[in-house]
Amino acid sequence: MKRGLLVALIVALVLAAGLSLLAGRVWIDPLAPETRNAALIVLGLRLPRAVLALAVGAGLGGAGAAMQGYLRNPLADPGLFGIAPGAALGAVLSFWTGYAASVWLLPVFALVGAAGAMALLAVIAGRQGGIAVFTMAGLMISSLAGALTSLAISLSPSPFAMSEIVTWLMGALADRSWREVVVATPLTLAGLALLLAAGRGLDALTLGEAAARSLGLDPRRLQVLMIAGVGLSVGAGVAVAGVIGFVGLMVPHLVRPLTDRRPSSLLVPSALAGALLLLVADCLCRILPLSGGELRLGIALSLIGAPFFLVLLLRMRRGLA
């Protein structure tokens, strides 16, 4: 891992965090005499939002790097495991049943949905299931969770509930508080710690499954670390911010050329870069002059991520030609 890259990412994060505290529909002048309103805006609204952007972005970036290393597929995204759709399904059910009215039950439902997807993935993949079985199981869970989410939306008990579900699924950090920070940050850090523990196994896996086993890799242990690590990192983010895609896909590609390309060397820079990307994107969503209100963060990142994904596909096609 290149130390200069880490230093540059940390410096950029500090600068972006400072900007996020000042930027918004109401700009804060750091040189002006401090006012009560400015302190309330910064400490009560923008600081928790910035911390949440750091936590959610780090979790998505680190999970994306780990997944691309585990599946040995540069197009892998955390949503492929089915954990993000499972968490989204849990949150949708909280709206559908009305329990989302309680401030703590929405993230609890989402985390239960993520845990259910993790458990189902572990059961289907089994002890001897290889990476191919693991990938197919994740795709099946994603499809099932997506179908159940669509069913819940179509059977929503009221137009208000349907509106709340659709708005939440777009993904955003607006109107979040320290409560969401307390929920997401410890779980994300725990998930990233598990992914870091899987780093050596991911490095061995680059040689192929058979070679990795000959080097002493325990596939079951690595699988458990990946399920738990990605589940906590991604599930915590979905629980508090809704569905935010493409971060785990884009970030590893942006930082990989600046590392030695080993999966273990990519985890920390991807987490930092994911935090930076989400923080900057959230600032831009906040200051864009839109008449209908603030642009949803999930939509903004999809508008960026879809062309990025297309460019990756075209590059891969040229490489195979």
Image: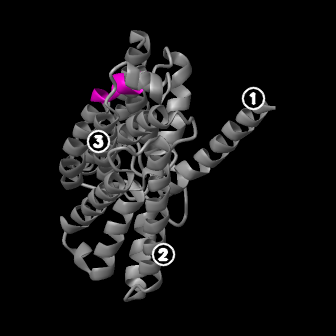
Residue indicated by mark 2: 150
Which percent across, then down, holds residue 242?
Answer: 38, 59
Residue indicated by mark 1: 319
N-terminal of the two: label 3 or label 2? 2
Badge 2 vs badge 1, beta-carbon distance below 8 Å: no
Residue 197 is a magenta residue: yes
Mark linked to residue 32: none
Quadrant of res 218: top left
Span colored in magenta: 196-203
Secondary element type, mark 1: helix
Quarter of the figure with the C terminus:
top right
- Disc 2 residue type (three-letter): Ser
Which percent across, then down, holds residue 27?
Answer: 39, 44
- Disc 1 residue type (three-letter): Gly
* Gap in angstroms between the C-alphas marked 3 and 2: 29 Å
Residue 50 is a magenta residue: no
